[in-house]
Image (spheres, rainbow, N blue to C red):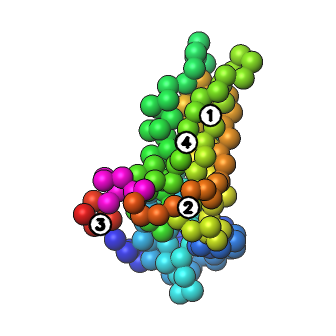
């Protein structure tokens, strides 16, 4: 889906896979390669980078409001299915499959803490050296916080068991052309 674009203004980007942030100057030529999960993966002359949805206008896309909205007050625990639905909106910037279908989310539970509810998630990455882990975990946390009834979210990166391709769901395998 590569689409060539020229940045209309300076933006902060995240280098893939190191996770290092850097400035991209207005006038930089980019190739848009993925537009999933509210962020944009772009190919540059020197590799891949991720641009946040709030900077979509700089690449000619509709800007996305990424601010975490306070969930509507509820009289009970968050719906676990709604949490899973939010996690399915989080993507590894190099792979066009959400983190749930990739098999990266090992566990999710809703915990009552005093009078509020915290969501705890354990997840991994496809490779332990990937510097994008903190960015992906923060995306997951932000999306979880949008679920009514959630007062806090703890997304932890774990390495046991090691991830492998057999953990990908059937839907994910179909998306990747593995079945």
Residue on which disc 1 sits: 119
Q: Residues within 10 Å of mark 3 (few under 14, many from 20)?
A: few
Calculate the distance from the C-alpha at mark 3 to the C-alpha at mark 4: 24 Å
- Dot 1 or dot 2: first in sequence order is 1
Q: Residues within 10 Å of mark 2 (few under 14, many from 20)?
A: few
Q: Is residue 33 magenta?
A: no
Q: Which mark is residue 162?
A: 2
Calculate the distance from the C-alpha at mark 2 to the C-alpha at mark 3: 20 Å
Calculate the distance from the C-alpha at mark 2 to the C-alpha at mark 4: 14 Å
Can I make out residue 1 in this image?
A: yes
Q: Residue at (45%, 77%) from the top-left corner? A: 31
Please name which of the two marks, 4 or 1, marks the residue nearer to the observer: 4
- Residue 117 position, x and y percent, is 65, 25
Calculate the distance from the C-alpha at mark 1 to the C-alpha at mark 2: 23 Å
- Residue 121 position, x and y percent, is 60, 42
Calculate the distance from the C-alpha at mark 1 to the C-alpha at mark 3: 32 Å
Please name which of the two marks, 2 or 3, marks the residue nearer to the observer: 2
Q: Seen in the image, is 102 located left or right of residue 109?
A: left
The quadrant the C terminus occupies is bottom left
Q: Residues within 10 Å of mark 1 (few under 14, many from 20)?
A: many
Secondary structure under tag 1 reads strand
Q: Which mark is residue 178?
A: 3
Name the magenta segment's main secondary structure. helix
Residue interval drawn in magenta: 167-173
- Asked if labels 4 and 3 touch by Cβ distance under 8 angstroms, the answer is no
- Dot 1 or dot 3: first in sequence order is 1
Can I make out residue 10 in this image?
A: no
């Amino acid at each position: 889906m590569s689409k060539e674009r020229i940045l209309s203004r300076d933006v902060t980007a995240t280098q893939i896979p190191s996770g290092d942030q850097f400035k991209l100057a207005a006038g930089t030529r980019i190739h848009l390669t993925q537009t999933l999960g509210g962020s944009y993966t772009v190919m540059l002359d020197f590799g891949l980078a991720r641009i946040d949805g709030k900077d979509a206008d700089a690449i000619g896309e509709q800007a996305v409001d990424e601010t975490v909205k306070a969930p509507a007050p509820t009289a009970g625990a968050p719906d676990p299915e709604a949490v899973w639905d939010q996690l399915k909106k989080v993507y590894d910037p190099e792979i066009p499959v959400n983190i749930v279908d990739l098999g990266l989310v090992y566990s999710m539970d809703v915990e009552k803490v005093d009078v509020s509810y915290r969501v705890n998630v354990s997840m991994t990455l496809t490779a332990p050296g990937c510097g994008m882990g903190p960015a992906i975990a923060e995306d997951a946390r932000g999306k979880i916080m949008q679920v009514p009834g959630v007062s806090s979210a703890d997304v932890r990166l774990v390495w046991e068991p090691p991830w492998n391709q057999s953990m990908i769901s059937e839907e994910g395998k179909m998306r990747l052309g593995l079945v």
